[in-house]
Amino acid sequence: MSSQVKTRRSGVRIMRRLITLVKPLLPVMCAAIFFGVIGYLCAIFLTILAGYAIIYTFLGIGAGGVSSGILASLHPTRIFAILLALAVSRGILHYAEQYCNHFIAFKLLAMIRNQVFAALRKLCPAKLEGKQKGNLISIITTDIELLEVFYAHTISPIAIASLTSLVMVLFIGSCSVWAGLTAFLGYLTVGAIIPFCNGRKGAEEGMRFRTAFGEMNSFVLDSLRGLDETIQYEKGQERTEDMSARSKQLGNYQEALSRLEGGQRSVTNLAVLACSFAVLFIMIALFRNGAVSSQELVLAVISMMGSFGPVIALSNLSNNLNQTLASGERVLSLLEEKPVVEEIADYDEHEADKKNAFTGADVKRVSFAYGEEQILTDYSLSVSPGSIIGIHGASGSGKSTLLKLLMRFWDVSKGSILVSGKNVTETPTKRLRDTESYVTQATHLFHDSIANNIAIGNPNAARNDIIEAAKQASIHDFIMTLPNGYDTEVGELGDTLSGGEKQRIGIARAFLHDAPFLLLDEPTSNLDALNEGIILKSLRKSCQKKTVVLVSHRASTMNLADVVYEMDHGRIS
């Protein structure tokens, strides 16, 4: 459990990068800021007006008595009407501000999710090789969801607090320059200095928490999928202890963030009280010296005490902002990650008819490694069109890696791979996918009908084509025994089907794709001897006009091949 992840950039840089995404919705953001500023001013002047009315109308203090008060000429009913109008306006404007902010937030979250899936589309399948899928799920779900706090409750509140504070500094400054300066320092301290200091202390804690949360998701997902094995081999206690340790670690990170939050609230409240009393003492001193009137004293003090709402809201944001910025860092890092293999987009749709013009494949002195682990070394292989090439070898010898290189899931370290005489690094990706069909060891089934799962091989295929592909894969008879036939739901991860049944659906997909170059990775590994024979017979019949590379550790499967190569630790014989 690492969880010791540091941010690659400062919180300001993360915020600046996230703010650039708001550009298409800038008019709505401006409206939210306008409504927010006017709404806060309504709330502030509601307090000011109420206090002023009470003091001057009912107590009648002032240099010239009641008659010198601004509200002296107003009837109490009118004063109440003004206060009511300000209160109602505050509610309406606050609703309008929140509506605009959340409109922006949810629009942007949808856009960011699209960008993340587009990024994963470019990064995969290499991105998922050995990666924690639970951590990726955490980024796609909770991390992106936390950005709602930033877009709905951070950007416009910063602008609202800045503009509202500027208005109040000028208003208080009209009573006394010293009071206005004190107000400016108070707003700056509560709204900027305290959150900034707290943010710097909490940035690493926030990233630790988000990373540990993602790792916890991966662990839970892994534990649920392996629950049968855990029970079978009596590893429940071990997994429970591991989960408890991870939960405790996560709790420690949360506790550290909570301590920072509590500390900030205390410091913020202390700063508000200190600044309010500072203005009170300054105005009293100036009043005694005759520099300000009683009216200015009252206005300045009430204004100062009632105007911290926007900056306090801004200060409180930094309590959650640590996690939000950590989530932003994780999302931005994923969006900015460079794919291991850059796809080639140029593809002439009119050339689609030429996909059957497959002229063979050549693997020329290829070397490849996953990080420090060398898989293939100076490997060469020639595949003639119309042949069935068998590659036999033990697990871990590099058989599956060879097929992934032919599909260009990875790029070779040395050497070259040619399909139809052209280097795969120069072949448009869609053209390469049209030329090849790939059946993996583990067939993934979506929570959908059997027909739709087979149709992944060709989304435009008619039902008759799907049925024909299923017949070629020797799965049609089984499908017809199901209650709803091809419309039967396979359940999550296809758990309602056996491994062999899922494997044959994967083969049906490949037949439906109808590519001239077929790559089969252990196509019979989950089948018994009888079903293996049926599949091999079907493959022999269906692949008469195709070129096949068949990978297996089973000697019996190699009976299908015209030529068999033996692979041993990345070398072939």
Image (cartoon, grey):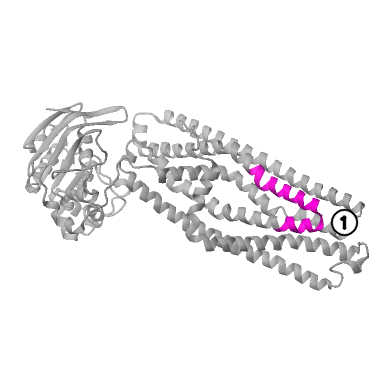
- Residue 54 vs 471, above or below: the answer is below
Kindly tell me whether residue 357 is visible in this rendering: yes
How crowded pointer 1 is (Cα within 10 Å; few <14, some 14-19, many 20+) is rated as: some
Q: Is residue 192 magenta?
A: yes
Q: Quadrant of residue 229?
A: top left
Dot 1 lies on which element? loop
Residue type at tag 1: Val
Q: Residue at x 58, y 45 (%)?
A: 320
Seen from the viewer's position, the closer of residues 224 and 186 is: 186
Where the N terminus falls, by quadrant? top left
Does residue 372 appear to the left or right of 138 in the view shown? left
Does residue 43 appear to the left or right of 536 in the view shown? right
Q: How many marks?
A: 1
Where the C terminus falls, by quadrant? top left
Give the x, y percent position of residue 47.
Answer: 76, 60
Does residue 66 appear to the left or right of 267 in the view shown? right
Kindly tell me whether residue 523 is visible in this rendering: no
Give the x, y percent position of residue 13.
Answer: 52, 44
Q: Is residue 172 magenta?
A: yes
Q: Which residue is mark 1?
A: 292
The secondary structure that most of the magenta stretch takes on is: helix
Seen from the viewer's position, the closer of residues 322 and 337 is: 337
Q: Residue at x 34, y 42 (%)?
A: 339
- Residue 61 vs 405, above or below: the answer is below
- Residue 180 vs 567, above or below: the answer is below
Give the x, y percent position of residue 246.
Answer: 48, 33
Residue interval drawn in magenta: 167-195
Give the x, y percent position of residue 210.
Answer: 50, 40
